[in-house]
Image (cartoon, grey):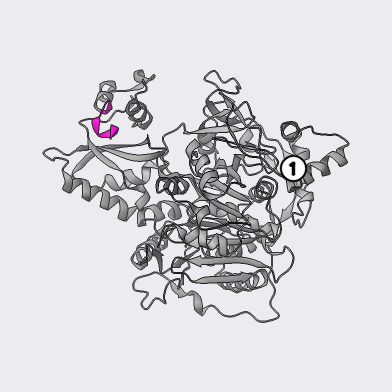
Amino acid sequence: MATQNILWTPHSKDTNLSRFQGHLETKLQKSFSDYVSFHKFSVEQYELFWKEWLFYSGFKLHKEPEKIIKHGNHFSKSIWLPGALYNFAENLLEVGNSNDLALVFYSEDGQIQRLTYAELKQEVLKLQKHLISLGVKKGDRVVGLVPNAPISTIGMLATTTLGAIWSSASPDFGVRGILDRFEQINPKVLISVESYLFKGKQISITDKLEEVSTQLTNTKDSEFKQTLVYDFVEPIKDFGKINFPFRYSEINKTNPSDQLAYTSISFSDPVYIMFSSGTTGLPKCIVQGGGVLLNHTKELSLHCNVSKQDRFFYYTTCGWMMWNWSQSVLALGATLYQFDGNPFHPSWETLWSMAEKESINVFGTSAKYLSVLEEEKVSIQNKYSLSTLKVILSTGSPLPNSGFRYVYENIKKDIQLSSISGGTDLNGCFALGNPILPVFEGQIQCKGLAMDVQVFDDMGKSVENQKGELVCPTPFPSMPLSFWNDESGAKYKSAYFETYDNIWCHGDFASITVENGMVIYGRSDATLNPGGVRIGTADIYSVVSTIPEVKDSVIIGQEYKDDVRVILFVVTADGVTLDESLVKKIKERIKVETSPRHVPSLVLSVPEIPYTVNGKKVEIAVKQTVAGIEVKNKNALANPNSLDYFRNRKELNV
């Protein structure tokens, strides 16, 4: 792989990363010549690294750990910080000056809400007392159907003050998508808005709430107590058939003498339940604990150079792990900026106007968002100086070379562009930015500190400057604690350890470059990634299976114009033709019952779908055939000739 163009070079090494490196050099009486040697140390001596970061970062503990890691007989059985006690929310709320801004929210209609740390704590206290009145305690689940707005942060913090478990989804999810997630974890409380804004329209979700709350009430062994409705756009007039409704605005106010209580939990106690995309069935419920926060602060402080009172923004929804990731900037004493709505409504200026007005320091978004700006030939620097902006973060899908060039030619020349890559599974990054390294076109700057990131070839050999599977042979603090309702750990092991024995295989194709950066080429499994938003085929299959005109189907993601588009192939029922009317019906049903992001770009007819001899639908084989790649494992197929129906389709080359 040829050396790429350098697009940016840092002006100073006076960064959080260099200061922490200096701290270690002084303490250990050793010197690191460059980042590569520092990273090598952090991987080889990862227990020492995490111990030093735990205390250097000021992580608030109620009790110190007996050791940093207790190794099990398998990677997945490793226990981080055994014996330690802490509280997740306390680490995000007790960070310094109570008059500093904690949250600033911009609504699509232009309304702005600001909360200091003191005001945020009061809101959290109010909700905490209400949750206690409902019997919420350590280990219970509280779920949010909320926008990326203060109510989402307040809900998460109030939940985790009690040692309870938080999980969230975006209000634009369809009923089935919501229930496929929340039914599995049997929540005690659902916090939801009554509606949200998108493209200037108010979209009510009260009908969804009726069905979701009813189903959560009827779940086996249901513990469901309340649907807590937050009036986000306008007060709801009629609760209708919503089960156990209560208006958020009617929660009792706190007394001046009331204080937040922080329940002590261990690092092995759940904090978040994240949901996989559900490629082969219901979304996996990924249980995560305190190691997530320890890793987040490392990533945000050392790799993104976020410090106290910096102003941090990430465009995300509450159904994406970047929401959880961005919340952790509060632990650094920074100000978290939130936005909910369409980032192009009423124009491309929406987010950049906010960034200029609010003197944003770190601006995070998806590669797809930057690609749209590029396609529209938007020159942001002609309108906004963005003098305070230090870092642009991009994730969700690989940022193409042209996207790198676009940022430096049209947004800002003197900027650290940090393409970052990780996943929901670890709620963090394997590879990300670095404030003391140059930015090379098309590359992620570096491997994450203390993350033993390697690339394996087809023989399971670690390689560089060659495409292969992204793996991690060494445990890390933000690894999942478990999967919900997976007592044996079989699902957990199956998800990450089937390819290589006792080595985490992430499912990304990647390469390590000659500059010691990384290039991610996309998913090596069948997960879809349109517009940088990772979604699963199971959500779409669950809808399509209810359409009587469709007998069978297969869904793939096709690489298309520096992005991924969803293609749905259907086998129609006997006597049924796939015409425009049926295509419209299929797309509309998918949009209503899942989300607009799940709607396929193309719906095409085929006479047969390929299956394995064990009866498993083979999406990857279809994807490879569409891409012109010869399928190597045809012997595993019960009907290998069916792949011919997907080869050289003219509709896929338009």
**Is 184 rendered above or below residue 75?**
below
Front in this rendered view, residue 123 or 438:
438
Residue 387 lies in magenta, yes or no? no
Residue found at the very far left of the displayed protein: 575
Q: Position of residue 304 (x, y in %)?
A: 65, 48
Q: Position of residue 59 (x, y in %)?
A: 74, 54
Looking at the image, which residue is at 29% across and 21% down?
640
Is residue 481 visible from the viewing direction of this image? no
Quadrant of the frame with the N terminus: top right
Looking at the image, which residue is at 53% across and 25% down?
468
**Is 304 rendered above or below residue 166?**
above
Label 1 sits on a secondary structure element that is helix
Quadrant of the frame with the C terminus: top left
Q: Is residue 142 left or right of residue 87?
A: left
Q: Is residue 547 left or right of residue 340?
A: left
Looking at the image, which residue is at 60% across and 74% down?
126
Q: Position of residue 622 (x, y in %)?
A: 33, 29
Residue 648 lies in magenta, yes or no? yes
Q: Position of residue 164 (x, y in %)?
A: 59, 60
Other-residue count near label 1 (Cα within 10 Å), few / some / many at <14 / 14–19 / ≥20: many
Looking at the image, which residue is at 32% across and 47% down?
599
Is residue 285 visible from the viewing direction of this image? yes
Q: Magenta residues? A: 646-654
> Hey, which quadrant is residue 481 in on the image?
top right
Q: Which residue is mark 1?
A: 50
> Hey, which quadrant is residue 232 in on the image?
bottom left
How many numbered discs sit on the rendered protein? 1
> Mark 1 belongs to which amino acid?
Trp
**Is 43 rendered above or below residue 326?**
above
